[in-house]
Amino acid sequence: MGEQGKEPFRVTLGVSAGISIYKSCDLVRRLLERGCEVRVVMTDHATRMVAPVTFQALSGNPVITDLFAGAGDPSIAHVELAKWEQLLVVAPATANVLAKFARGLADDFLSTHYLASTAPVLLVPAMNGNMWRHPATQENLQLLSARGHHLMQPGRGQLACGDYDDGRLPEPASIAEQALHLLQATGRMAGLKVLVTAGPTREPLDGVRFLTNRSSGKMGYAVAREAALRGARVTLVSGPVALDAPVGVERVPVTTAEEMEREVGARFPESDILVMAAAVADYRAKAVTAGKRKKGTAGAWAPELVPTSDILKALAPAKRPGQFVCGFAAETSDLKANALQKLREKRLDLIAANDVSKEGAGFDSDINSLVILAPDGSEQRVPETTKASCASALWDAILEARGEG
């Protein structure tokens, strides 16, 4: 059973034509051991490497290989399967399948089913190291991560081509554990009201110029998306970003720190959990120049800057029993010490610290790493991974700190 006294978890396993396909056979067994019912979908090329009857025998269910099954009208099995499943796992996920998913190409059952599914998606890439590092593959991975899909990083080791490189499929036990984690997380936050902030703020200097920072909003959006996937009612107060609102999340757009303070303050009393992931500007212009200040104006331009309001610090006195507040600390040095100081000064329940000086992670990236700190100084480290996975780890930590883990 999926959980004690409950029906089995329902998992669709997509299998594409990677040389590590033999591990997918073991993955079916691992999922069954963890209380899952598994239905397997194979690409045409995958059936040339392992016979569908093998997966049918292992899963106990017919294997789907054809978009046009049977005679007469085309089957709508991809829609029916989408209604049934609680999680879509694709392992191995080849470069070809990742490209189809990223671009919305639907030319076989698996890619068509992907577009019909609204379930969480766990992608487990496996391929040659050069294919993995190719800019096209990395761009597709960024698109899929931005949609909130969960990605397991391939391992490093001996590949079928003989190279010792990145691209190995993770072990089936690890994939099954990640799948079970996602299944157990779904719905755990039902009934909770969650407030998340994300993105930068913009503080005007004149009619066209402003102060801001490099925050893309991706981390905060991943936090909001993950909370919604777990069943929470989520409000996202967002600074200016080039991101779509996550499905099921109410987005409240703001521009300045003052606007963010107002919108957060109005919603905080009714919220169970606040995650302040926004990179709020620390300073604003004391006086905003009317219109555009011309470059030819005599003398240097030295606008007088004053601090913006400290939103978290201002909310501390209004915090009611049972409310939980998690902050973020974007640091470039003394990560833990600076984060702990912020946590204690602002009376936070938890803080997620990240080093934004790391190349390829933090600001502007789909990758991040976190150090999650509690008031007693205990810590949990989330190694460099996708922001979607960081968000999942952060919610696990928040729920555990609330006694709901």
Image: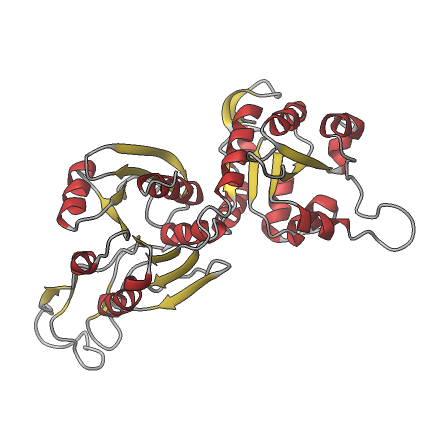
Picture layout, residue 112 above or below residue 281:
above
Q: Which of 341 and 359 is in front in this view?
A: 341
Picture layout, residue 180 above or below residue 74:
above
Q: Nearer the viewer, residue 364 or 220?
A: 220
Picture layout, residue 358 above or below residue 250:
above
Q: Which residue lies furthest to the right in this view?
A: 71
Q: Left or right? Give the position of 113 relative to 304.
A: right
Total count of labels: 0
Q: Position of residue 235 (x, y in %)?
A: 39, 62
Q: Where is residue 170 in the image (x, y as percent from the top left)?
A: 54, 26
According to the image, what is the colour scheme of the structure?
Answer: secondary structure
Q: Where is residue 276 in the image (x, y as percent from the top left)?
A: 29, 54
Q: Residue furthest bottom?
A: 290
> In which image quadrant can residue 383 be found?
top left
For image coordinates 22% across by 44% down, the residue present is 331
Q: Left or right? Give the position of 165 relative to 109.
A: left
Q: Can residue 15 be seen in this view?
A: no
Q: Which residue lies furthest to the front in this view?
A: 5
- Quadrant location of the C terminus in the rendered image: top left
- Quadrant location of the N terminus in the rendered image: top right
Q: Can residue 295 be seen in this view?
A: yes
Q: Position of residue 275 (x, y in %)?
A: 31, 52
For image coordinates 32% across by 63% down, the residue present is 270
Q: Nearer the viewer, residue 69 or 262?
A: 262
Q: Left or right? Give the position of 201 relative to 100.
A: left
